[in-house]
Image (tube, coloured by chain):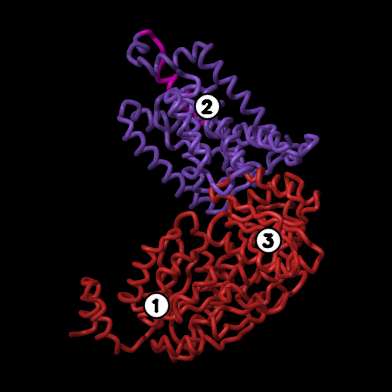
Amino acid sequence: MSHSIRRSAAALTISAATTLALTSFGAAAQTVKVGIVGPFSGPFAHYGTLFKNGAEAYIASQGGKLAGKEVELIYRDTGGPNPGQTKTLVQELIVKDKVDYLGGFVFTPNAFAVAPLIQQSQTPTVIFNAATSAITDKSEFFIRTSYTLWQVTVPMAQWAAKNNIKKVVTAVTDYGPGIDAETAFKSEFAKQGGTVVESIRMPISTTDFAPFVQRIKASGAQAVYTFLPGGPPNLGFVKAYNENGLAKAGVQFLGTAEMDEFDLQKFGDSALGLTTAFHYSAAHDSPANKKFVEALKKKDANAIANYASVGAWDGMHVIHKMIEATGGQKDGLKAVAAARSLQWESPRGPVRIDPKTRHIVQNVYLRQVEKAGALLVNKEVQNFGPQIDYGLDK
Amino acid sequence: MQLLANVLIDGLAYGMVLFIIAVGLSVTLGLMRFVNLAHGAFAMIGGYAAALLTREAQWSFWIAVPVAVAATAALGAVLEALVLRHLYRRTELEQVLFTIGLSFFLIALTNALAGPQVQLIVLPPLLAQSVDLGFRTLPAQRLLVIAAGLVVAAAAAWTVTRTRFGIWLRAAVDHPDTAATLGIPIRTVQCASFAAGAALAGLGGVLGAELMPLEPYYALKYLVLVLVVVAVGGMGSLPGSLLAAVSLGIVETASKYLASDWGGLFFFLAMALLLAWRPNGLLKR
């Protein structure tokens, strides 16, 4: 039985695919296959574009090959948070397309859903975005190059406490990551001796934020720590924060991902001076970041450098090093072992992979929105130094 | 006391935004009995046109808005004349299927042409500021929405009940054949009414954009809210829609102040209770 017949047989009979996967295991890998899983259509399609630009720009910056091997990126569209479909797509990628690595993942439930698959097939999987701490616990083949809310929130809470902010109100969207953010801030701020006077959870369908902003104003807090999903909710909240004169009333804005470069220009001058703690700013001043931004623009003049595209760029770097360590052979255990001790200069600053959690250890910066020419940028005003994922100890 | 005032003011402002977005549907679905689920798409087109004109072409807001509304009306008229008029006598299910398909088409088209990101309408300085009410501030834009809502409600109610056109419209909807034999130009009336509905949708898209930001999924995202307002207000009753929008807006706002952990529960609970109490609309017995 020749290889080609075997392949088509595998395509036709998915039920028998596992057996066939074993028999065709000996085939020498000509190219390294990487499955990129993310939303490429629907309301979150821009994440897919950010992943695609970041990953392809990285490969182009390495001269089109990684560690001397041809790399084939296979994109799979999950739409939105859709664990069932993601599982099916990833199963196909592993069994039918026989990918060597997986990358991508915007939503936490989608990442959770594939944990048993990558564990069983020993497929190293690099999370470019999904930010819930527990993901890397679910399989030893997960490596993450994004961030977690704990990672950026803990230094923010410490900074607030050090800067004479005693009373804070938290206002988060009432869903998984929002509650994660609220818990992270509350526990660290209490440890630092501060008080959270009120915790507001805003329904995910909220469009009118004025009532919540009035409650924040009435709470008597000196600052509001907030977390909202990107896009319309985020824009709506910041707008309400400004229109209701909270900055003037002396309630400082403390955020994390809110001033992300994808939305930043839409805030207009109302965003000036807003404070966030985050791991990546497109305005980060370093040769590595310049190289990253240039590579992106070469790929697509409208490409945006933000946390998702840098997550994909660094994710491809990790995959690059894993291909190097295994010589292009499929060997998940060896690849992940190599990834555990990686450290490199990322566009966001010096980073390394924590050998224990397989999560990225990186600097977190305090940033303020400023104007550079006609455009708004996140100017890094303070470096909190390398931070681990504090969420996993909880 | 301050809390009550806050609830009433924010509730009124939110309710007026709901009304201004829903009023166009009150005309097409309510008065013309055409199940127009593409209403959100028309609102989106109006909003996008205003965003394009104020941001890319740098037109003044006060000129851009009427032009955007007129453009939406023209598009509505063309679509009505070419396609939608064939649906008036079809079943409601066919109307639903066609207009929801039209919405999906327009979402994909918007996504392809303008991209997935949120579009902002540039407000003139007069509207971008906050107005001091003594004990708190309110964005000036909200005052414009409240005023526009009242004007639209009054003008539309007057047109429907007091003018010849309104009589023609009601006749054309209730007894099209009789109306035609009486010499009423049914086609013109239908086309003009649909265009007016589209124009109001466009106006809602523009004025409501501060709370309901424009993006390709706008066309479906807020459709439920709009349908709720029209259903609670009663088919074809513009004052009913206004009352429904403001009451529901106040309920929603009060729940945000007092019981935000319950999410949107109270809004839909209020809808269910109001519909049980007055199934044909708030102002109809």
- Chain painted red: A
- Mark 3 and mark 2: Cα distance apart in space: 39 Å
Residue at image mark 2: B241
User: Pointer 3: what residue?
Assistant: A255
Identify the residue at horizontal 78%, vertical 61% (top origin).
A166
- Coordinates of residue A54 in the picture (x, y in percent): 54, 71
Point out the residue furthest to the left here: A1
Specify whether disc 3 shares its chain with disc 1: yes
C-alpha separation, residue under disc 2 versus residue under disc 1? 54 Å
Question: Of helix, strand and loop, which one carries label 3?
Answer: strand
Residue B67 sits in which quadrant?
Answer: top right
The crowd level at tag 3 (other Cα within 10 Å; few <14, some 14-19, many 20+) is: many
Residue A281 shows in the view: no
Q: Is residue B243 shown left or right of residue A378?
A: left
Q: Which residue is mark 1?
A: A118
Q: Give above or below for B116 relative to B242.
A: below
Specify whether residue B193 is painted magenta. Answer: yes
* Mark sitting earlier along the chain (3/1): 1
